Amino acid sequence: MKFFIDTANFSEIKKIIDVFPIDGVTTNPTLISQTGESIQSLIPKICELVQKPVSAEVIETEKDKMYQEALQLSKLHKNVVVKLPLTKDGLAVCRLLKEKEIPTNVTLCFSPLQALRAAQSGATMVSIFVGRLDDIDQSGMQVVADTLEIFSNYSLKTEVLVASIRHQKHILDSALLGTDIVTAPYKVLNQIIQHPLTDIGLKKFLESAQALQKK
């Protein structure tokens, strides 16, 4: 399973790759707006830092304008993955970008049938928002499981990306299901390598080592 970090914070990305390698970055207009930088300046910097796929999202909603914006985003860096909404216009643009071999991340997916349509439209990856589904008392992970089964049934190459990660259990469940990618915020990625028993064990080891040095 690939690990992406869901952030536009350059400092967070640098910190996380110092701890363990990541396989990509997902951003969105909200995250970028929090940095005070423009998409045009920030996305190339992130791409150069990670040298892995970086999702940059369109803000246009009408097909022709969305397509032109998508082309401009793809020119920012060779590692840019154009992020498109799962709408009729978004899927239409996805097909056009597929013809140009421009990678896409179809986002805001909330059902297996939406995911299937994205895959059939040529999406490189489709982002299922499990946390937001959980918020309305629907099982986000069941949507992921159903999507993975459908994609397997038809040998679809679109990667399933689990997004809107809220906690470690989402990541564990994704791994158990055989998900292709999870994208999580900096805080959650840090949490998965932490455990109180690890801290207790390390403390005891250090205390024993100090006792030995005094002999």
Image (cartoon, rainbow, N blue to C red):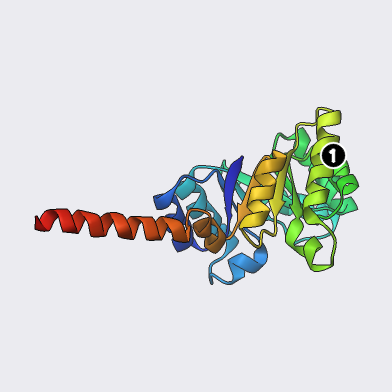
Q: Residue 149 appears in which quarter of the rendering?
A: top right
Q: On the picture, is 65 further left or further right than 25?
A: right
| Residue 115 in the image, given as x and y percentages of width and height | 84, 45
In this view, 80 is above or below 66: above
- The residue that appears at 82% across and 34% down in the rendered structure is 151
Mark yes or no: residue 80 visible. Answer: yes
- In the picture, which quadrant includes the N terminus? top right
Question: Can residue 71 be seen by looking at this rendering?
Answer: no
> Where does residue 134 sit, x and y in percent of width and height?
79, 63
Between 99 and 79, the one lying in front of the other is: 79
Q: Is residue 215 left or right of residue 95?
A: left
Identify the residue shown where x is 34% and y is 56%. 202
Image vertical order of residue 90 relative to residue 154, above or below: below
Residue 165 x %, y %: 66, 58
Residue that lies at the very extreme toward the top in this rendered image? 155
Q: Quadrant of residue 125?
A: top right
Give percent across and percent down for residue 86. Answer: 83, 53
Tell me the residue that label 1 is attached to: 121
Q: Residue at x 9, y 55 (%)?
A: 215
User: Which residue is depicted at the point 51% across and 46% down?
Assistant: 22
How many marks do you count on the picture?
1
- Badge 1: how crowded within 10 Å, few (<14), some, or many (20+)? many
Q: Secondary structure at mark 1?
A: loop
Q: Residue furthest front?
A: 215
Q: Along the line of sight, which residue is nearer the eye, 52 or 186?
A: 186
Amino acid of disc 1: Ser
